[in-house]
Amino acid sequence: MNLVCFDFDGTITKDDSLLGFIAYVVGFKKFFKGVFLLSPILILYQLGIISNNFTRQRLMIHFFGGMSQKEFDKICYKYSKTHIDGILLDSAMSKIYEHKANGDIVCIVSASLTDWLKPWCDEKGLDLIATNIKKTNGIITGEIDGKNCYGNEKVTRIKSKYDLNKFDKIIAYGDSRGDKEMLEFADESYYRKFR
């Protein structure tokens, strides 16, 4: 039995789901206004001057901070059930089903939020390691709870979740800088396999 770790955004999806999810939650008018206000941060991120962690947290605080947890959970569940299947790459999903048919444990390892990925993963019978958002007294703060599941944190979380001695091999699929450490850690790795 193998442990097979798939990144989500850009690996098994057509593009990054975070911006699409934000637009879904807040509406396009608020989305474009927020992107305009946050554009200096987004530009610095694209230039490699500030980190993925900082950028992601600023986005989440801006768009989700102050939202009720109950409302957020409801929107995440609806998004997961109605939108994720529409952004998936057929070739990636075929490979996931192939691994599952072979008896492998398949885990989605993503910097995206647990809240919108978990309902979809549960439905597909997939394990999940993802970024968590902080909730205090029933309110979303927008801050990251723990660490962003990106880069080396992906490897740390895989090691924490599983007894790796139980697996014949670790296989990883990724598409970006955030997957580098996971791909290097795996016994067998595939970069942009489905592009």
Image (cartoon, rainbow, N blue to C red):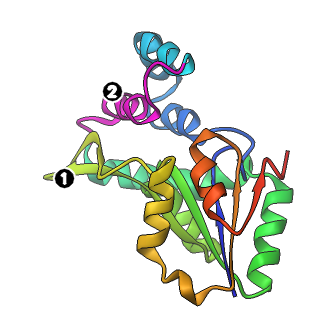
Horizontal arrangement in the rendering, residue 101 relative to residue 41 (left or right): right
In depth, the one of 56 and 152 nearer the eye is: 152
Which quadrant would the N terminus be assigned to in this image? bottom right
Nearer to us of marks 1 and 2 is 2
Number of marks present in the image shown: 2
Q: Amino acid at mark 1?
A: Gly
Identified at 60% across, 73% down, the residue is 126
Residue 62 badge: 2
Identified at 83% across, 52% down, the residue is 193
Q: Secondary structure at mark 1?
A: loop
Does residue 180 appear in this view? yes
| Magenta span includes 60 | yes
Q: Amino acid at mark 2?
A: His
Is 59 above or below relative to 186? above
Q: Which residue is mark 1?
A: 138
Identified at 86% across, 58% down, the residue is 91
Distance of mark 1 from mark 2, alpha carbons? 17 Å
Give how far across and how far down residue 63 sits, in percent. 37, 30
Q: Main secondary structure of the magenta part?
A: helix
Horizontal arrangement in the rendering, residue 74 relative to residue 117 (left or right): left
Identify the image quadrant of residue 3: bottom right
| Magenta span includes 185 | no
Dots 1, 2 in contact, CB < 8 A: no
The span picked out in magenta is 48-67
Give how far across and how far down residue 93 sits, in percent. 78, 63
Is 34 above or below relative to 51? above
Specify few, some or many for label 2: CA neighbours under 10 Å numbering under 14, 14-19, or 20 or more.
some
Does residue 33 appear in this view? no
In depth, the one of 84 and 103 nearer the eye is: 103
